Image: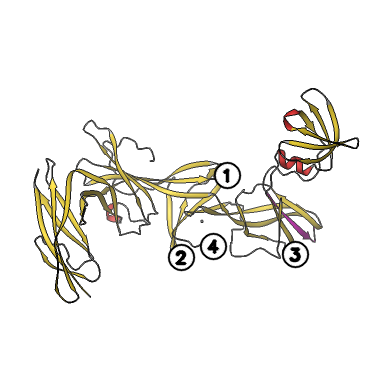
Amino acid sequence: MKRYITCLMMLAVLAISSTDAKNLTVYNSGYALYGEEIKFNMKKGVHTYPLTEVPETLDTGSISIYPVQNKNIVIYEQNYDYDLVNTSQLFRKQLGRTIKMVTVQGDELQGTLLSYDGSSVLVEIKGELHSIRGDQIFRYSFEKGGEVMVRPTLSWMMKSPVEGRHSFNLAYLLNGMRWFSKYNLILDDNEASGILNSWITLSNDSGKAFDQVKLQLMAGDVQRLTQQAPVSRAKGMMYEEMAMSDTAVSEEGMMEYHLYTVERPISIGARQKKEIPFFSPVKIKTEKKLKYQVAEYNKKVNVTVEFMNTKENGMGMALPAGILSVYKNDTAGNVQFVGNDQVDHTPRNEKITVKIGDSFDIIGETVILKRETPKKNTHDTQYKVTVKNRKETRETVYVTYYRSARERMTQYEVNPTDRDSREIVFPVKLAPDQEKSFTFTVRVQY
């Protein structure tokens, strides 16, 4: 099957450099923008010029091509052939032509190929029609006829006033490429600090290999209308700043998004996944928190790890969304996985909070003691919260209540951090094997 696209000049919305450099920008929504300079040995007059190294997932409506120097070259037509050769296609292209066959019994047959349905062939031999099962054919051959494509191909019908080698800037969008970040945090024994490193995972399912390209990664919610890294032993390692080596990735703002550029050329094959260091390991300050959300029937106390994305904390760069995995050394010094969570795009100077699981030895409980209507359009609800610490260490549980816009707190036995916030937090300190209960009341007025 062949698709024909007619154009005067391709859309100019995708601009690329006029140098020989190849640029690949991958978006975290599953597509990429590729740009390169291509050269054709052109003849005078109207001729067709093919380009075979193109992806199977090419978005033909996004193609931009224009001559670098000779502006008098006219592009009449652009074609994209993606119906690649296989047995069915080969037979289809040879319909009406002579086919030679040798059967499993050794009989040699020659005739005109009339049809092929995948299981049998219909052949006219000396004026007679013969249907031959495919499993009875030992070997077949025919003269090559028709256009046989072994890979996706772009071609352009162009008119040139002169002969010679001419350069064109080419850019297009393609599907099947994506990237995401993986972050690994190894907590120190005191859980107040740790070592953070990161990988960029790049996958290529576009059907095209990219060799020595300038790789850029776009993070953010870009609208388009049409889509556990290994951990080394970290004992004794100390990093005081976010070190950038020749494997580093630089970052810049791009409109309302963030663009990351890998500082060395990258090659990635078709159907390949590649891991690239995002930044060198860095020592950061962290805080482990135990959080209990007030809700009937909820007994789980969440375990979270928090840290600030600031320069003072060895970071301070906009971090793209990804999975952050947390590890910690056991008493024998072996690294153990203790949980992970998805983190969203995080600007600099913002807090990152990762829920890594639920506490085994600390539990919570919520009971509604009463519901009252002290006056018309006014409703009071009194909650009783109990938290229990079955560990042998002192712990603080941050009991959290998310109030609606109409609610306000009228009574509480434990002082909240901010009773006017939408997220009301009650810090509850517990000694080993201690449990505490407290009540609070919220009022809704309509």
Camera sees residue 224: yes
Name of the residue lying farthest toward the top = 105
Magenta highlight: main SS: strand
On screen, residue 434 versus residue 241, left or right, reads left
Q: Residues within 10 Å of mark 3 (few under 14, many from 20)?
A: few
In x, y percent, where is residue 79?
A: 71, 55
- The residues bearing labels 4 and 3 have C-alpha atoms spaced at a distance of 33 Å
Is the image coloured rainbow, by chain, by secondary structure, or in one colour?
Answer: secondary structure
Toward the viewer: 197 or 370? Answer: 370
Q: Element at badge 4?
A: loop
Identify the residue under disc 1: 211
Answer whether residue 56 is magenta in the image: no
Is residue 156 rendered magenta in the image? Answer: yes
Amino acid type at mark 1: Asp
Vertical placement of residue 108 versus 143, above or below: above
Q: Are marks 1 and 2 in contact (CB under 8 Å)?
A: no
Label 2: which residue?
A: 255
Residue span colored magenta: 153-162
Q: Secondary structure at mark 3?
A: loop
| Res 72 label | 3
- Let me know if residue 280 appears in the view: no
Do callouts 2 and 4 mark residues in contact (Cβ within 8 Å)?
no
- Labels 1 and 2: the sequence-earlier one: 1
Name the kind of residue labelled 2 in the image. Met
In the foreground, 313 or 221 = 221
Give the residue at mark 4: 225
Residue 329 screen position, x and y as percent: 25, 36
Among numbered discs 1 and 4, the one appearing first in the sequence: 1
Q: Residues within 10 Å of mark 1 (few under 14, many from 20)?
A: few
Residue 82 placement, left or right of 178: right
**Mark seen at residue 441:** none
First in sequence: mark 4 or mark 3? 3
